[in-house]
Each structure stands twice: as structure tokens, then as C-alpha cells.
Image (spheres, rainbow, N blue to C red):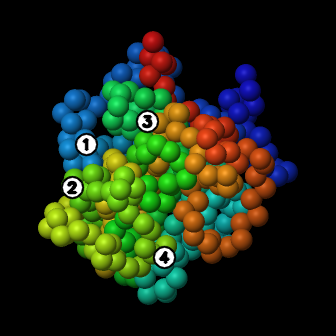
Amino acid sequence: MSASMSQQPREFSPGILDWSTVHKPTGELFPPVKDKNEWNKFKWSQDQVDQFRRDGFLLHVPLLTEEQCDKILEDFKYFMDPRARHPGHAMLYEFHANQCNDPNNVVMHVLGHWRLTKALHDLVFLPQVVVPASQLVDESCPEAAVRLWTDQLFLKPPRHGGVVAWHQDYSYWVRTKPMKHITVHIALDDQTEENGCIQYVPGSHRWTRNGDPFPVLDHSFRDMEGIKSILTDEEKAAFKPVPALLKKGHASFHNAMTVHGSYDNKTDKPRRAAVLNYFADGVYSDTDKAMLRGNSGTDTDENLDDKLSQETIIPKGHKMEGQFFPLVYDPAWTK
């Protein structure tokens, strides 16, 4: 068994473990699946799959218990308070204490934290996520093997939590081909319109520009309505967002081309979410640049001294795989 498939993580630096070198759950957050037949109980119904295909998203999927959410929230302390910073902070792909760069509109945004703790690591392997992802990520087949693209954390603090502008996720990920990506947004607090819940535009996953996603208009997330400046009259007429209104522990699944965003947090409590991004096994690199996980093309708040190896570089035309793109589910595992 290779080191990356063992239960023992390698060290990132002396005494600091890198959990991205373990490509299966540790059991910290949920019991690992041991019986191949058990995978099938996590499959979605055909009605759920059809609704996802039609709208570009599906809401109110129960994923985590209250206790599991609280385990994830315990690890938020590593990102909210610099004094509590995790010793492996340099392993993050991106860290934005405030992506908006406006003290009155704050959105904390973190990528790559699955490398830091057992609970955050295990979340990306959650069966209730990866099995449905297999059904959704590739429209050309009923089930596909699935790999992790990246994980994200979002925090909108009380009273001055900022917006996340309308966008399509794949706009940030065009350095991979083809578009076979999916996103799962997990509410770690009850989400309401008042605290800035995620919202979706039904049918917008079919909106392209000559087959490409919309361009990224604002890396700072601040210009909420900027996308409307590039919509056609038909798209503007169809722009009717649906607020997700997720309960704590519930999730929404969306196509990486679906237009979505969220408004500011006007309440006295934080709005926190964990986001997981996946792609179909076989997606390949379409760039010769270093493929640091999940990097959206923005500058981080800090110069993270990430001691990554050449494994982070996937040459153009080569399959996306390796340490930072683990296989999280394969339908062959049920055979």
C-alpha cells in the first residue's frame, strides 16, 4: 500500500501532519463504509437526479448531525483568531481573512483545510456527498468515479458579513477540461435571507458564452450585481434567484455552471458554511501552470509558504490526479 493510501499521514514539516497524504476517512467524523453493498444506500432517487439536471441545483439535503457540525465548527477557531492559528497554516491553498478587503463587508474564505485536521479531512469523503456526486458530475453517464477538487470554508460574521457576488464556479476552474465539476454547500448554521443564505438562479447552468462560462468580473466578491451587465435580455428575464434557506447540517448540491451568490449578514450571529468541490475522474489539465489546489486566481491575504512538491504541477493534457486530487468514490467499489 502506498504512503498516500495509508492511514498514517506524512509530515509536512517536523511534527506537523499533512492529512492530504491519506486518501480515505480516518473515522473521526463518521464510520467508514466497510461493506461494498452499503454504498448503494447513499444513492439519490431518479426524481432527485432529474430535478438537479433541470434546475442546476438541489436543496435541503440532510448530511450532518448537530454533533458533526459542531466538530467542524470547533476547527473554525484556527481561521477566525490568529492567536489560535493551526501550526500547519502554511499548507492552506488560500487564506482570506476578508476576501472583500472592506472592514464593513467581511467574508472569510479558506481553501485546502482538509490537510489540517482529521474532521476537516474526513468531510471530503462523506458518503452522503460523494455517492450522489457520482450520479451528478457527468451528464453523459449515470455514475462516474469522483475526485476531490478542493474544499472551502466561508464565514460571514455578525452584522457586517459581506456578499458573495453572483458567479459560476467553473469560471474560476477553466484550467481544467471538460466541465465535469460539482459543488456541495453545507450549512453549519441555519441560513436565512437575513444572514445571507446561498441563492440560485434556476436553469442558469445552461448559460454560456460560446460554450465557456461567464468571465470572472470581481475577484473580491463585492460587486453583487455586476454579472447583470453581461447578461442577455433573455437571461435577465429568467434571473429569478431562489434562496436555499438551509438548516444546520443540510446542504445544497449545484452544477459548477449554475449562477449563485449570497447577500450580506444583517443578523447578530455568524453564518458559516463548508463547501466541497469535486470533478469526474478523467478530467485533465488545460494549463502548464502549477495547479495549486482550488486557487481561484486571487491573491491571498498572506504569502503562504506552501512547501508543495512537483505533485502540484499537472502538465497540460494530463489527467488530474495525485496527492491533492484523491479518488473519493468509484462505482466499481460496489461490484
Extreme-front residue of the structure: 210
On residue 52, which mark appears? 1
The residue beneath circle 2 is: 202
Q: Determine whether the residue tagged by mark 1 lies in a helix, strand or loop.
A: helix
The mark nearer the N terminus, 2 or 1, is: 1
On residue 220, which mark appears? 4
- On screen, residue 194 versus residue 155, left or right, reads left
Tell me the amino acid under the disc marked 1. Phe
**Gap in angstroms between the C-alphas marked 2 and 4:** 24 Å
The mark tally for this picture is 4
Extreme-top residue of the structure: 335
Residue placed most toward the observer, 21 or 171: 171
Category of crowding for the residue at label 4, using alpha-carbon neighbours closer than 10 angstroms: few (below 14), some (14–19), many (at least 20): some
The residue beneath circle 3 is: 130
**Gap in angstroms between the C-alphas marked 4 and 3:** 30 Å
Q: Quadrant of the C terminus?
A: top left
Residue placed most toward the observer, 248 or 186: 186
Q: Is residue 61 visible?
A: yes
Category of crowding for the residue at label 3, using alpha-carbon neighbours closer than 10 angstroms: few (below 14), some (14–19), many (at least 20): many
Q: Is residue 264 visible?
A: no
Tell me the amino acid under the disc marked 3. Val
The residue positioned 43% from the left and 73% from the top of the image is 217
